[in-house]
Amino acid sequence: MTHSKILIVDDESFMRQTLAEALRSWNYQSVQAGSVAEAKRVFAEEEPAVVLLDIDLPDGSGLDVLTDIKQQNPETIAVMITGNVDVKNTVAALRGGAHDFIGKPVRLEELRVTLRNALETRRLRREVKQARRERESRFNFEQIIGESAAMRKAKDLARRVAASDVASILLQGDTGTGKDLFARAIHQASPRSNAPYLAINCAALPATLIESELFGYAKGAFSGAAQAKKGKFEIADGGTLFLDEIGDMSPRVQAKMLRVLEEQRFEPVGSNRAVTVDVRVISATNQNLDELIEGGTFRADLFYRLNVIPFQIPPLRERLEDVPALIEHFNRRFSAAYGKKPKIFAPAAIEAMQNYAWLGNVRELKNTIERIVIMTAKQKIGTEDLPMMSDEKPPASSYRFPSFKEATDAYQREFIERKLAEAGGNVSRAAEIMGVDRSHLHRRIRALGVQSEKGGVK
């Protein structure tokens, strides 16, 4: 099977024919040109994947052709062919984007290997470009579902922040509101989008590990450090580092974080070598940092550094008008993922979900729709098919509470107690059922004074 069109540019017809015969035997298709003018015309007409380009041509230099083809299609691979390897020409060709050099007389086996490598390079470049396009389509602001006034305001602010050169952004909001989606979208819309984006959950790592994860370590820094390792800050240089659950960071790491934000440099664990970086830090928390500062567990000076741009992501209960669009989005997404026909949600079911409190926010709604798609055989979904409604008891009247906070706390307390009972008092299992982080559920349990039916939680 013939594949990959290659343009041969050489003023010697015998050389062109020799190369064309070799290419044909290797199953490549070839076209030819003998001058600068002809090369530019043929390239525009044929759009070859690779150009074998002689530098010395009768009406000019092959370097002029190189400039022209790279302007038309940067993905084109150019291999320079010359009988006179000149340092000046070599430097100019490499700067112009040439992939390789081959000297005359051309050795066919060398050419064959060079072409194989050149086409592999082109394939990898295309894969990287495609992966970047897919990443951009997944992590842009259009993929954050919601057109309520609260979400439009949040997305507008995020776009302005992304375009700025501010080095630190603090995202605050309940668990499950989509702080990670906003962080990725901000990175993707920023001038840093081609540089790395790394994320780390500060609550998921022990205090003894998070410092080395963020800042790296020197060889021999501790037992088991057989070789030096770069930390997330160094790897993310030029890009964005997303620090989730920043409120769980230890005091020692907070001190080191403050220095990075102030000076853009740090020392890896066990090293005296200072590493300078240029990293935008997007931090996130569902905790009240003001309360942590008052309690002495979070540094006020670090908070002020992180909070250059304060950013509040609204909970789902404050934008319930977005629920129908979210239902449709997750219904299509999970139906496609599991090879099923999309469900039809009855108006009453949609209304019931709009009236639900969604303690776990969008994450809980997403888990609910996924569960319905997988577990419900019916095509049309009514209120009786909604998992959170199946064991719902009539809620205590909210009118007896003097404030919204007290009414919300009462509902959350009852909801958590019911889910803990369902999970046998196991907090991890209850958190999974509710679609929230275990650490967040523990904090709500303590704040609300929740007790399981067995008199405690585990």
Image (spheres, rainbow, N blue to C red):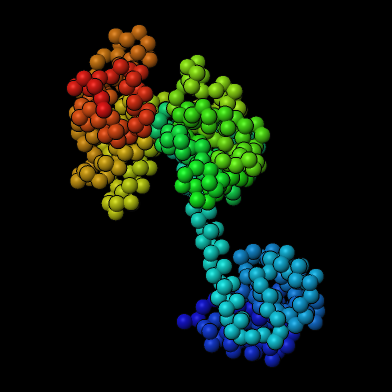
Give percent across and percent down for residue 148.
46, 30
Front residue of 260 and 58 = 260
- What residue is at 31 percent from the left and 49 percent from the top? 335
Front residue of 447 and 309 = 447
Give percent across and percent down for residue 432.
30, 35
Front residue of 286 and 228 = 228
Give percent across and percent down for residue 344.
27, 42
Q: Residue furthest bottom?
A: 14
Residue 20 horizontal side relative to residue 65, left or right? left
Residue 23 position (above or below residue 329): below
Front residue of 449 and 320 = 449
Residue 196 position (above or below residue 182): below
Quarter of the rendering occupied by the C terminus:
top left
The image quadrant of residue 215 is top right
Residue 346 position (above or below residue 118): above
- What residue is at 37 percent from the left and 28 percent from the top? 440
The image quadrant of residue 177 is top left
Give percent across and percent down for residue 373.
27, 44
Q: Can you see residue 167?
A: yes
Q: Can you see residue 279?
A: no
Residue 352 horizontal side relative to residue 70, left or right? left
- What residue is at 56 percent from the left and 63 percent from the top? 125
How many marks the image carries: the answer is 0
- What residue is at 48 percent from the left and 30 percent from the top? 249
